Image: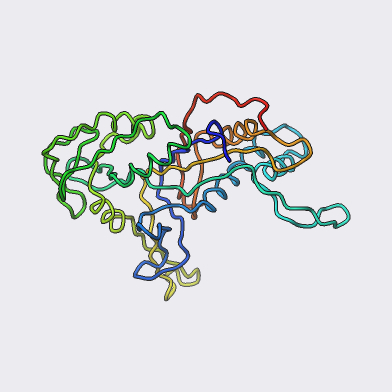
């Protein structure tokens, strides 16, 4: 059981395209991204999220930890206490060292808003009623007092303008959507996105069907080749296509903090939470192709004003 005051939402805003690879291809794209099995929506599986958090955590404390000769060793030990350690032999005497589960639990990174090319601006963000229903269920775990309206456009190829002031036909890639004649009030939804993702300032609420179509067909596809150093030309058979979640996509992760799973002077949940949120306070890198600048995410932790749990174990 995770107390509500030890559950936080981490909102991730993509500053660069993200490639969280699925590891298998069934079509023309050689390197597709991860997707939910039942919806087909892009996501980042929890194992990838936790691995990215762990790596950033280790790099942070290795860089800014106590100024001493074994700073990197101390950072590694803290990382193992917070995120867990594998079973293996210790350095002294080769004795078996027991494994330890981590004290940080994360969910999959779920899609909140998706950027799409448009005729009214360079791009707009879209979301849908199914995303909002899922968000409402998830936020009950960490922010149950936050109102989430059950808004939805009435009819096919319709939209509700949440922010940005759109009031005419809008072209979204290959779709033409029209404003909802019912005039659904989106004021509460606008306030919600100001809290979760302030950068999202041109948001349209579209139908679930239109949203699913766009997130399946409007991701970024980039070709890759390999150069032969001897000839300076492309190696035969090296062409491949990689799928990317576009920059400006917005995802969120539920993060739960618990007591360190160690009987000897364990770290308390609030200490672990403070260590993690301090290390991953503004940015984190996620997915592959780090040296190409892929997967750089801007981080927002919510709620931001949660009181400390003190000595709760």
Query: Can you give x and y, in whole percent of width and height, for residue 214 in the image?
Result: 27, 54
Q: Residue at x 67, y 39 (%)?
A: 62
Query: In the rendered image, which quarter is residue 240 located in?
Result: bottom left
Query: Left of 20 or right of it: where is 205?
Result: left
Query: In the rendered image, which quarter is residue 212 located in?
Result: bottom left
Q: Residue at x 62, y 31 (%)?
A: 270
| Relative depth, front residue between 71 and 133 | 133
Query: Left of 237 or right of it: where is 191?
Result: left
| Relative depth, front residue between 11 and 144 | 144
Q: Quadrant of the N terminus?
A: top right
Query: Can you give x and y, in whole percent of width and height, for residue 96 in the image?
Result: 81, 57
Furthest residue toward right:
93
Above or below, comparing residue 197 to residue 91 in the picture: above
Is the image coloured rainbow, by chain, by secondary structure, or in one colour? Answer: rainbow
Query: In the rendered image, which quarter is residue 165 located in?
Result: top left
Q: Residue at x 48, y 33 (%)?
A: 301
- Tally of numbered discs: 0
Q: Quadrant of the C terminus?
A: top right
Furthest residue toward front:
1
Query: Left of 68 or right of it: where is 121?
Result: left
Query: Can you give x and y, in whole percent of width and height, for residue 6 in the image?
Result: 56, 34
| Relative depth, front residue between 145 and 303 | 145
Above or below, comparing residue 294 to residue 63 in the picture: below
Query: Can you give x and y, in whole percent of width and height, for residue 105 in the image?
Result: 57, 45
Above or below, comparing residue 209 to residue 159 in the picture: below
């Amino acid at each position: 059981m995770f107390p509500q005051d030890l559950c936080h939402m981490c909102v991730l805003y993509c500053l660069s395209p993200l490639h969280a690879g699925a590891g298998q291809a069934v079509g023309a794209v050689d390197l597709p991204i991860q997707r939910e099995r039942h919806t087909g929506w892009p996501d980042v599986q929890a194992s990838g999220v936790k691995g990215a958090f762990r790596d950033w955590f280790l790099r942070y404390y290795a860089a800014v930890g106590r100024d001493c000769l074994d700073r990197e060793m101390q950072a590694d030990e803290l990382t193992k206490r917070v995120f867990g350690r594998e079973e293996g032999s210790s350095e002294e005497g080769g004795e078996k060292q027991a494994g330890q589960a981590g004290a940080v639990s994360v969910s999959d990174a779920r899609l909140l808003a998706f950027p799409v090319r448009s005729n009214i601006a360079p791009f707009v963000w879209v979301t849908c009623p199914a995303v909002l229903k899922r968000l409402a269920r998830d936020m009950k775990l960490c922010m149950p007092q936050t109102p989430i309206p059950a808004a939805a456009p009435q009819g096919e190829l319709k939209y509700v303008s949440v922010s940005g002031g759109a009031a005419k036909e809008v072209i979204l890639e290959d779709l033409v959507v029209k404003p909802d004649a019912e005039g659904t009030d989106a004021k509460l939804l606008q306030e919600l996105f100001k809290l979760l993702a302030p950068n999202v300032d041109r948001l349209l609420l579209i139908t679930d069907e239109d949203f699913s179509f766009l997130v399946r067909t409007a991701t970024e596809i980039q070709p890759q080749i390999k150069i032969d150093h001897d000839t300076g030309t492309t190696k035969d058979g090296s062409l491949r296509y990689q799928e990317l979640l576009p920059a400006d996509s917005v995802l969120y992760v539920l993060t739960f903090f618990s007591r360190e799973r160690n009987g000897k002077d364990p770290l308390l949940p609030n200490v672990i939470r403070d260590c993690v949120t301090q290390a991953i306070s503004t940015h984190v890198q996620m997915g592959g192709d780090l040296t190409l600048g892929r997967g750089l995410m801007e981080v927002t932790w919510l709620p931001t004003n949660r009181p400390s749990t003190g000595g709760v174990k």
